[in-house]
Image: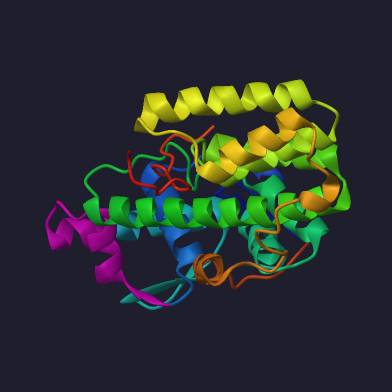
Amino acid sequence: MTKVLKVTVLGYPAVYFDQTAVSLSAKSTALLAYLLVEDREHSRQALASLLWGEVSDADARRNLRGEILRLRRAVGDCICGGSQTAVFQPPTPFRTDLQTFTTGAHSQDPRLMQAALDQYRGEFLQELTVRHAPDFDHWLQQQRTRFQQTAVSLYSRLTHHQLEQGDWHGGLQNVRRWLTLDPLNETAHRRYMRLLTHDAQRTAALAHYENLADLLQAELQIDPAPETTALADQIRAGSLSPKQTAALQPLKPSSAAQAAINKTAFPFMVGSPQTHPTTNVGHQREKR
């Protein structure tokens, strides 16, 4: 029977080989994830410097050789290359959450978008700490920001579609998850208020507005945006109708969101609460 390699990196990292959980060191996990995401051949010197930037070159190269050997013993010969290079060459079959996430990020199909968001269980390599590797830490923070921005774009596009289609229950579930990622995003809060109102929860929608106002004052010392207050006034007056759903964007991502998504390309299309959230992703208004 063919052995399957499965790698999960969105949320807590996990590796399974032949249906058995594989225990890897932080360095091996970092090396595998880096080669998985950065799909090209790398010089061993560059990888050694990335993961052991605070030791001598000779020690760094020796450490890298040891980690590659341990990875090969644990998950098979997926790290290939010559004596001076290394590249990730996944076996067949191979499974990773990045496959489903990337497919959904580039899709306008709500089912694929939902499947992608279901794979986003937390930040990239959640709680992974790699000692003496400042360059890797910098790369890791960039990836966490990039994948979070892609997830936020997906939530925005999908919940807009669910609002237009009258899927109040699905939309509410997704906006709650969106707000966990980006709690100061007023677009998400307004969508939540609209969905609550259409779901016959007008009192809850107005209570949510008051809670949002308190949150913005506590965190940013600002009031809600005029469009948020206007929406609350509409809800209070009972004048909000389904036809007034704010057409912020269709299923197709905006140009800015598409730029982040394009960086989330993943090559291996085979097989079937945030620890460090990005600060104020969705709230860039100046303090008043």
By secondary structure, the bulk of the magenta-drawn segment is best described as helix
Q: Is residue 247 above or below residue 204?
A: below
- Residue 225 point in image, percent of width and height: 50, 42
**In this rendering, is residue 172 above or below 158?**
above
Direction from residue 218 to residue 101 in the image, left or right: right
- Residue at 75% of width from left, 21% of height from top? 203
Question: Which contiguous range is marked in magenta?
Answer: 41-63
**Figure quadrant of the N terminus:** bottom right
Closer to the camera in the image, 164 or 118: 164
Image-quadrant location for residue 34: bottom left
Asked if the magenta segment contains residue 251, the reply would be no
Q: Quadrant of the C terminus?
A: top left
Q: Is residue 36 visible?
A: yes
Position of residue 222 in the picture relative to residue 78 (left or right): left
Q: Is residue 160 above or below residue 197?
A: below
- In percent of width and height, residue 115 lies at 75, 52
- Image point (67%, 62%), residue name: 249
Instruction: Pick the residue in front: 202 or 69.
Output: 202
Residue 84, x across and y down, in percent: 31, 77
Residue 46 falls within the magenta-colored stretch:
yes
21 horizontally vs 168: left or right: left
Residue at (73, 33) in percent of width and height: 235
